[in-house]
Image (cartoon, rainbow, N blue to C red):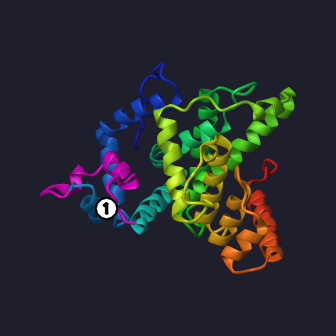
Amino acid sequence: MLEVQHSAPTAGGIFDRLDAEWAALCADAAVQAAVTDWLVTDRLASDVAAVTDAVTDSWVRSLGPAQLLAALRPRDGAMTDALTDAVLRALLRRAAGRDRSAALAARIVVQAMIPAAVRMTRGQVRPFGGRSFDDIGHMTVAALFEIACSGRIHTRPGRPAANLALDTLRHVCRELAADREERGEDLAAAEDLADSAPGPAETAEAWDIRAAAAAVGLHPAVAVSEAESSRARLELLELVLDAMETGTLSPADGRAIAWHYTAEPVTDTAAASRAGTTAGAWQRRRSRAVARLAASLQLRPAA
């Protein structure tokens, strides 16, 4: 029976501890053998080996958790969306089991989703009166693990990573809302505080979000003002992009929201002219799109 060994915690916060634990998992021969068996059984071994430079005379034995992570986080664009989704779905199917290997599969899913978990954690940290980054990080990771094991994600249409991230965000928002209600904290003043100066990581993340938004026409103009870099604006764009990826919003729905909720909103008349419709129809589209986005993120009662 597979035993998943856990390394001793470090003082670097939840995500640093996960990375340290991951290094230990990658060095564990039992874990490597288990992952190799999964890939062979699921008929994914040759495809994963081909895109992770693991093809050698003994390439099957060289496949392990490190190659799985490389397949799930492609850096050079060589990995296809179809293969990425197939690998993640296979892991999620195994994570929904009841044996000890299910915990390992869920742990690999969590490691693959760490970049998304960091973004979600940053988005929920309040500069005044809220929980710390590490507190919310713990909550996010726990939600990711629980949802990965739930068996709900791999059966859904659409990209599994987007579905997993959306369910995790809903879970975290629900927990934080319950926590704030219980503690009676009034965080309204925090919403009016100016954003702190972003560091290099935040700047890179903001650039990625703006580039993705520009690619699908969510920016109302070619030039993006400094106001477009605000945290609230970037969070809105990220939510709209996620909703478009999962099929909750169409591209036109996304533009109807993004063009209106910006520092310099596009008027309904101007937006309708660009879209080839009437101002009234455009306004109705935006109202329906906002309702669908809100419904997808609304806080649901705990099961």
Q: Which residue is situated farthest in the top direction here?
A: 11
Image spot of residue 142 (x, y percent)? 60, 39
Q: Is residue 62 left or right of residue 137?
A: left
Image spot of residue 56 (x, y percent)? 14, 57
- In this rendered view, identify the residue nearer to me: 122 or 162: 122
Residue drawn at point x = 41 percent, y = 38 percent: 3
| Quarter where residue 172 is shown | top right
- Start and end of the magenta stretch? 55-80
Q: Is residue 206 left or right of residue 282?
A: left
**Label 1 sits on residue:** 78
Q: Secondary structure at mark 1?
A: loop
Is residue 58 a member of the stretch shown in magenta? yes
Residue drawn at point x = 80 percent, y = 68 percent: 288
Q: Residues within 10 Å of mark 1 (few under 14, many from 20)?
A: few
> Is residue 149 in view?
no
Q: Amino acid at mark 1?
A: Ala
Image spot of residue 299 (x, y percent)? 79, 49
